[in-house]
Amino acid sequence: MPIEQRGVDTIPEEERTSTPRDLVAILLGSNLCLGVIVFGWLPPSFGLGLWPSVTAIVTGTLIGIAFTAPLALVSLRTGTNLSTSSGAQFGVRGRLVGSVVGLLLSLGYTALTLWIGGDVMVGVLSRLTGLPDGGASRALMYGVLAACTVVGAVFGYRLLLRMSKLLAVAMVVLLAVGVFAYSGDFTTAAPPDTPYLLGSFWPTWVLAAVAAGLSGPVAFITLLGDYTRYISPARHGSRKVFWATCAGLLFGLLVPQLFGTYTALAARAGLDYAGPLVEASPGWYLIPLLLAAAGGSIGNAGLMLYSMGLDLDAILPRATRTRATLIAAGVATGFVFLGSFAWSAQAAMTSFVLLLTALGTPWAVITLIGHLRCRGKYDQEALQVFNRRARGGVYWYSAGWNLRATASWAAGAAVGLAAVSTPLYEGPLLALTGGVDCSFILSGLVGGLVYTALTFRTAPVREVVLAID
C-alpha cells in the first residue's frame, strides 16, 4: 500500500471513494480503545455510582453528537479537512485558529491513548512474565506504541480505514468477553474513599456529563472532516452522511465508555484506572486485555496522529504531511512522559478536556453558522490560497483574516475559560453559576451570538461567489 501523498489539499472527485458505511467503521473501530474506555472511569472516580455515571455519560454524549455531527457535512462539500474548511468563515489565514485547536485536541488524545495503553500493557506483562512495573518499562512501552502508531499515521487514511474495520470486530469481541471477566467483582457503588469531587451530587454529575460524555464527540470537532472529505457528495447525500456520523459516534463512544464505567466499578478504581484494571483481571483474561490495549491504542492514536499531521501541515505549508506527522509524533510522545511521570491522571484528563472544550466549542459554532448561511456552497480553490502561499480569493477578507469571526471566537473562548471548573483551575464566573461548570454552553452561546451580531448585515460569501459567476 503506497504512502498517502495528500495533505490538506482538496481531494479530487475520482479519489473520493469512501462510503457512509466506511465512516461508521472508522468511528467505531478507532474508538474501541483504552484511550476512550478510560473516560468511563472518570464518573466513578468523581464519586458517582453506576446509574449516575451512566446517565451522565449518555446525556453528555447525546448532546455532544447533536452538536458535533453536522460538522461532518462541511468537509463533504469542501473536499478538505475541517480546519482548512473553516477558512470560509475565519479567512484563509484565520483558519489557523481551527488548526491550532485541532492540533491541541489530537495531541492530548494521542498522548492519553499511548499513556493508558502503555500502562495497562506493562501491568499485564508484569503479571504474566514478571517484567518490572517501573519507569523504564513504561518508557519502553510508550516508545514501542508510538513507533507502531507512526507507521499507520504516515501511510494514511486507507491503512487506518482497514485497521478500523478489523478493530471494529475484534475489539467488540474482546470487550464482550471482558464484561464476563469482571462480572464477579462488579458493584453499583462508587469506589471506596471517593467522595463527590465537587462536594455535592449535581455539580459533580454535570462535571461528569461534560468531562466524560460531552468531551467524546467534541474531540471530533476538527477530525470528522479528515474522513468525510473522502466521501463523494455526488454519490452520497448529506442525510446519509449525517446519520452515519451519528451512528458511528454513538456506538463508537458509548460502548467503550460504558465498559470503562463497568470495569472501574468492578475494579474499585478510584484515583487510578490502569493499575486496578489489571489487578482485578482474572488470569485467563490477561492476554485478551493485552491485545485490546495494544491493538486499540495503535488504532486510535494512529488516527489522532494522522489528524495532527494534517493540522501541522496546514500550519506549516512548506512541510510535507509525512514530515509534519513525524514532528507531531515526537511532541505527543513527550507529552506521554510528562503525563505519566509528572501529573495525576484524573486531574490531567479532566483539566485537559474541559479547557479544550471551552476553546473548541465557539470555533465549531461559528463554523456551523457559516455553513448554514452559505448553504453548503464553497469555493474550493479559494480555500487553498494559504496552502499555496498565494493571496486573494473570496475568503481573503482582511489580509487573510476575518476579524469579526476571530473576535467572536476569542470572546466565546474567554468566557468559556472563565466558567470552567477543573481540579487544577477554576474560572471566576463559577460564582455566578453556583459552582456548576457551564463552560461548554456559555462559550458556544457567546461565540455564536457575537458572530451573529457582528455579521448580521453581511451577505454570505456564497452570494458573492454567485454574483461573480
Image: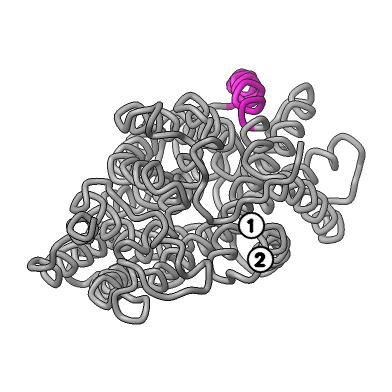
Relative image position of residue 164 (x, y in whole percent): 62, 31
The foreground one among 320 and 333 is 320
Q: Is residue 233 visible?
A: yes
Q: Quadrant of the C terminus?
A: bottom left
Q: Quadrant of the N terminus?
A: top right
Circle 2: residue type: Phe
Label 1 with label 2: CB-CB less than 8 Å: yes
Q: Which residues are magenta?
A: 164-185
At x 59%, y 45%, the residue is 35
Relative image position of residue 225 (x, y in whole percent): 45, 46
Q: Which mark is residue 335?
A: 2
At x 66%, y 22%, the residue is 170
Hey, which quadrant is residue 408 in on the image? Answer: bottom left
Is residue 82 shown above or below 24?
below
The earlier-in-sequence mark between 1 and 2 is 1
Q: CA distance from mark 1 to mark 2?
A: 6 Å
At x 29%, y 68%, the residue is 416
Is residue 146 shown above or below 73?
below
Circle 1: residue type: Ala
Relative image position of residue 467 (x, y in whole percent): 17, 58
Magenta residues, dominant SS class: helix
Q: Which residue is mark 1?
A: 111
Hey, which quadrant is residue 152 in on the image? Answer: top right
- Check the image and tell me how it is coloured: one colour
Q: Is residue 428 visible?
A: no
Is residue 442 shown above or below 69?
below
The foreground one among 75 and 98 is 75
